Structure formats: structure tokens, C-alpha cells
Image (cartoon, grey):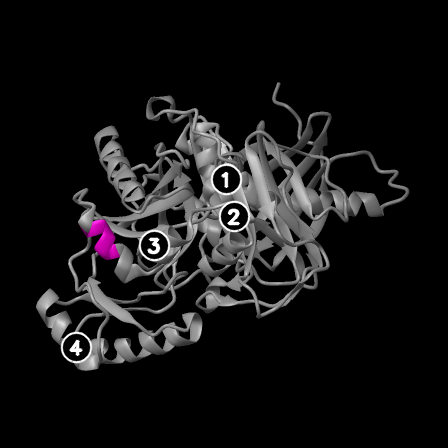
Amino acid sequence: MHVLSWHLSEARITFVGPAVHAIEVMGDKIASRKLALSAGLPVVPGHDEALADVDDALNQASVIGYPVMLKASAGGGGKGMRIAMDEASCREGFERARSEAQSSFGDNRIFVEKFIAEPRHIEIQVLADQHGHCIHLNERECSIQRRHQKVIEEAPSPFLDHASRQAMGEQALALVRAVDYCSAGTVEFIVEPSGDFYFLEMNTRLQVEHPVTEYITGLDLVEWMLRIAAGESLTLSQKDIGISGWSMEARLYAEDPSRGFLPSTGRLSRYQPPSAGRHVRVDSGVDEGDEIGIYYDPLLAKLITYGDSRNEAIARMRTALDQFRIDGVVTNRLALAALFEHERFLTGSLSTGFIDQTFPDGFGALVPSNEVRRRMVGLAAVLHHRLERRAVVNDIVSPGRWEYSVRLDDSREQVEVLETRQGYEVLLGDELVVIKTGWWPPQPVVAFEIDGAEFFAQFDCHEMGYRMQHGSILSVAAGVTDACRCPARQDAD
């Protein structure tokens, strides 16, 4: 990016972003680490020069103490990084990291620092104008990652208290002043479980996750980038920046979580995002019919939600994921749903190792809770009943209860369905619930209510029955058979 900025400057064209010097220094992890040290920021213990060769890597690693992290100085996006637990993995990791750095960035410089176990990844959004004014816009937590790349971001962090937030913000602004930064940027930190934090890097651009900051501050960061580039002064002071509500962002990728998040390719035969509104935002760069190839990042869309509380933002995210229909490529949508359902995530107990620790066997065989399972069984019976009744042209028999045998994956349940003016009374064992829905085929997303609570699911006819998706659960064998009409139930005298 610094090359583009330089050429624009030479042509006297305004670049919407920081100066060339800031991009160059912050884009080099070794140089940025040295500058952070000189500005008084805490940095991860490590070696501040590029490693000469594998022997140098082994020597420095032994001084720092294993485990260590080998990192590309020009790196980003999780590339050119290797964790070394001992000499053997350090030797192999150095060669692999250097090779990947050269192929990805054209720069094979590698440095080494202490590997921090169970860290959180928390970043501070900053704004600085051309007149020496700078502010921070509080933090975003980006700890949920796979392959060192962010998957879920939220603001604020469930971990930080006011004092920690202020301390990190002040350190971020110290770096902004040290590099004479201008425009929007992000200073990233690694945070230990103890609360100690260390400078990681600075991103000299508007990041993918900026909408969560916009939601909780009410500021338009793109607008401020344009105003700053035009020479305007910040009209905001630090005391003007507060936190209102909570926001979540999920990145929808064309990738297969059951195969180690390998990229997925194909044509988007269906691309139906949820309706955007005050509490739901969709930033997307693709449309139905587009070809998803191997030459670009597999990110399809960013799904952002907002609520008065963290729980409300999560609930809206889960609903929006249920509404987001993508066919033609494998995506991480169900894996995202599983993350937002997990008890550890709900309690805010996060770290960069969350996915590997919480789902060590991957996302291939998720088990639904009893509540979700019953919800799917009841819905399958009702949708099947609607399809069956729709197919009957002249049903001269009076309405009554209908009994269905619903097979969800490897088990069967008997379900009774009774049409009423209020919807469908569904008997699941000893539990009676009322389900309402206006669904008709070929709608791919079903809106339904159970006892007044609104839900969404994805539903298709399948050669083995029905294909249903709700939350993190995919059932490719929701068979509904053995329908029979039962006598109407009589109320007791």
C-alpha cells in the first residue's frame, strides 16, 4: 500500500489514509516493534532483528525460552507464522515460515518472540488528523480465530474493565504520536489471562471489523477518513467517545470447516442474505451467480449485529445466520452458529485457541441440544403436514389430528399435529407446543414461531426426506412418514 500512497503523493493526488512513512514503518513488524519500544509500549519478549539463518533462530529461541513464535517481518493474514515448541519444530518452522514469507510477501525476513499461551487478541481503533489531534475509539476483541485469522469480532471486549481500556488506549495513542500517524488505524495487542498486554502490530488501514466500532460509538469511520484526508480537524475529543450497546461481527467464508477450513470453490447458485436494518448489517462483495475461485480471499460477507447487551447482539446474530442462505459453495455458516451457541463463548471466556480447544474434532458432527432437537422435529412434522395437505385437492374428510413418524438422523419420534385457528398444536411426547408458520415452497428459509418465540430455519426437499438447517445443526435425513388421521381429541368433562 505504501507504493500506491507514494505514487499518489508524487502525482499530487490525495491519498485517503496515512503518510507513506507510517505505512512503511508499521508494515514492517521488526521496525514497528522497535518504534513501539522507543515509544514506551510493552512488547512481547523476543529478538528485535531479522534472523540470519536457522542456527541464529535456534540460538535466539534458546535465549527466549520455548515455546516461541516465528513471524514474517512483512507478514499479515496469518501467513509466515509458526509456533515452535522445541528445537526440532523451530528448525522446521523457520524454514517453512521463511519460504511462505518469500512466496507471499517477497520478503523472507523472519524474527522470533515468546509465544504467549491462551492470549486474547484485542485491538484499539484510533483516529488522527493532520493537525496533531488523535483519539481512540475503544477496543474490539478479535480472539476467535482460525489459522491466525479473525473469524468473529465484537465490541466492546467482555474482558476489559475501564482502567484496562484506558491504559490500552493511551498506549495506542503514544504509538500514533510516535509515528506521526494520520487517518483511521488500528493498534493490536496480545493480552495475557492476567491482563498484561503487549503490542502486536499496527494496521494502517480501515479494517474488516470496523462496523462493530461504528455501532457502539455512533461514528462513521469512512466519513472521518475522508474528512481528515480533506484536511479537516477532528471535532471530537476523547471525552466525547463512549460505549453504547454491544456489537458482533461474523465473517462468512467459502471454506469447509470439516476439512480444516480448506477454501471452497464453485458458483453461488443461491445467495440470500438476511434483511438489513437498524440492528443487522450485511457487507458483501458477491452476488448470486458469481463464481468463487481460488485466486482471491474466500471472504464472502461480513454479518454485523447490534444490541443493547452482549446477549442481545448474540441472539440477533444467531437469527441472522439462520436467515442467511448460501448455496453452491461450502461455507462456515454452521460453524459460526456453533460458536455463537457455545457456553464458553456465551460467558466471554475467549482466547485465540478457542476453536481448536472447544472443537478439537472439528465441526463435522455437532450434537443438538434437546431443545433444538425438539424444535426441529416439531417443525419437520408441521412442514410435512402443510406439503401433504397442499397436495390433496379434494379432502372431504373432516379435519382431525394427524400422526407422523419423524426421523431426525438416527432416531425416530412420534408427533401429532392438529390444525387450529392459532396455528398447529404439536404433541411431542408429553409436551404440547403451538407452532405458527406461513411457509410455502419454494421458500428456502422458514420463519416460524413456537409458543410465541420467533425462529428461522432452512428447509429443502431431499431424496431421503428433508434437508433442514437450524442453528448449528444440519440434518440431511429429516424423514417424515407413516401419516395417519387420528380421532379428534376430546376434552375431559
Residue 330 lies left or right of residue 68; in this view the side is right
Q: Is residue 399 in sight in this rendering?
A: yes
**Residue most toward the top?**
493
Q: Are marks 1 and 2 in contact (CB under 8 Å)?
A: yes
Q: Which residues are magenta?
A: 33-37
Mark on residue 26?
3
Q: Main secondary structure of the magenta part?
A: helix
Residue 200 lies left or right of residue 462; in this view the side is left
Q: Earlier in the sequence, mark 2 or mark 3?
A: 2
Dividing the picture into quadrants, the one containing residue 320 is: top right
Amino acid marked by disc 1: Ala
Amino acid marked by disc 3: Met
Closest to the camera, between mark 4 and mark 1, is 1
Q: Which residue is mark 1?
A: 229
- The secondary structure type at the circle numbered 3 is helix
Mark on residue 15?
2
- The secondary structure type at the circle numbered 1 is helix
Mark on residue 56?
4
